[in-house]
Amino acid sequence: MSVSSFVSPVIDAFGAESTTNTTEIELIESLARRYGAPFLMLDCDIVRRQYHALKEALPGVVLHFALKPLPHPAVVSTLLAEGASFDLATTGEVELVQSLNVPADKTIHTHPIKRDRDIRDALDYGCTVFVVDNINELEKFVAYRDQAEVLVRLSFRNPNAVSDLSKKFGCTEQGAYAIIARAFELGIKVKGLSFHVGSQTLDADKYVHAINRCDAVIRGVSSQGLPALEVLDIGGGFPVSYDDTDVNIYSFCAPIREALAQLPATVNVIAEPGRFIVAPAMTSVASVMGQAERDGETWYYLDDGIYGSFSGILFDHGHYPVDALYWQGERFPSVLAGPTCDSIDVIAETIMLPKLNNGDLIVGRMMGAYTSATATEFNFFKKAQIIVLNEFVRDESLAPVVALEI
């Protein structure tokens, strides 16, 4: 049996009956005894499950995992073995995939604004596809026009997304025509178009609109006698549920599939999923290191917090389902605070929890995206170690494999 079969559905952070089962409790207790808290459990079986679910929902679309939400070697190795490609944005990410022997032709570099050395580092590795969204950026590739190809990123604003990524990056449709025409003059190959409708996009019509507008640009470019565009990158932003709301990714992607079917047959489609692949794959475990009664509530001070694994509360607008490992019994109004001396370091207020003792464990779900990746060691509290589960595909009759990330 794989460890992923032990992992329960999301625990309601507001006091609904927990679904943590005995086997998972035993696993968490065992890991806590062996490694100490805080720690994060990264289940590679869930990474595989999420990848294949999105592959099924978007048949024919080449998925480039975006490293930034969880740039962990086990995630990269797991996805590489499943056939995934990768989306890179920094030299550090280039170095990570290179160290893990990811073939360079399975990567693209999608940061719209780059230093010259960023371009050179990627090209030295063998990554040759880059993203631009303005003439200034395009002209950086004059020196590399015999090696590099570019995608032109368009902006489609989406203020309802958790993060409207078209606010910071992307050009208008007319801007795209201007960039493509200038690239032709400079001898730089434009391979295609890209967009990103924003993180945690709950409305598939945002993708449909962007695909349709890009389709118009692709056809318009050909009608103007410019070289045909070969690629459309539809970005990421595919939603996952942080509560008990059901997100059926196959149904969600149905209108996206319909829109993609209208593209010219010569256009290859790629995507850059990040959060969808890894958010459900990591669970946090922290321990109570102290407590106090304040204004009728019990404050529990944990050894992990806002400056650590729960950094996504600030940086990612995150709301993670948390509960006590031992959830049974009467519940009382409580506050979960982090370990640092900063008053902003509060994970959850007015949360209903059973009475806890020092040393008791608190479990956080959906902790794979923008948590460890954005954690700090402020106040010299060390980042939670990552414990990797099910990294290697194996016979299901074998016991769970647990490998400690050093």
Image (tube, rainbow, N blue to C red):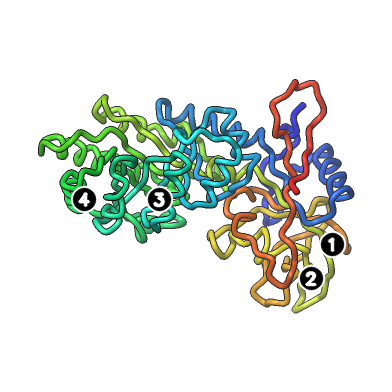
Q: Earlier in the sequence, mark 3 or mark 4?
A: 3
Residue 191, by quadrant, is top left
Q: Which of the two marks, 4 or 1, is nearer to us in this view?
A: 4
Q: Amino acid at mark 2?
A: Thr
Q: CA distance from mark 2 to mark 4?
A: 58 Å
Q: Is residue 315 above or below residue 217?
A: below
Residue 179 tag number:
4
> How dense is the environment of label 2, judged by Cα within 10 Å: few (below 14), some, or many (20 and up)?
many
Q: Residue at x 81, y 56 (%)?
A: 37
Residue 355 tag number:
1
- The answer to whether marks 2 and 1 mark residues whose Cβ atoms lie closer than 8 Å is yes
Q: Amino acid at mark 3?
A: Ile
Q: Residue at x 64, y 74 (%)?
A: 344
Q: Element under label 1?
A: loop
Q: Which residue is mark 2?
A: 298
Query: Whole-percent x and y of residue 401?
Result: 78, 33
Residue 8, by quadrant, is top right
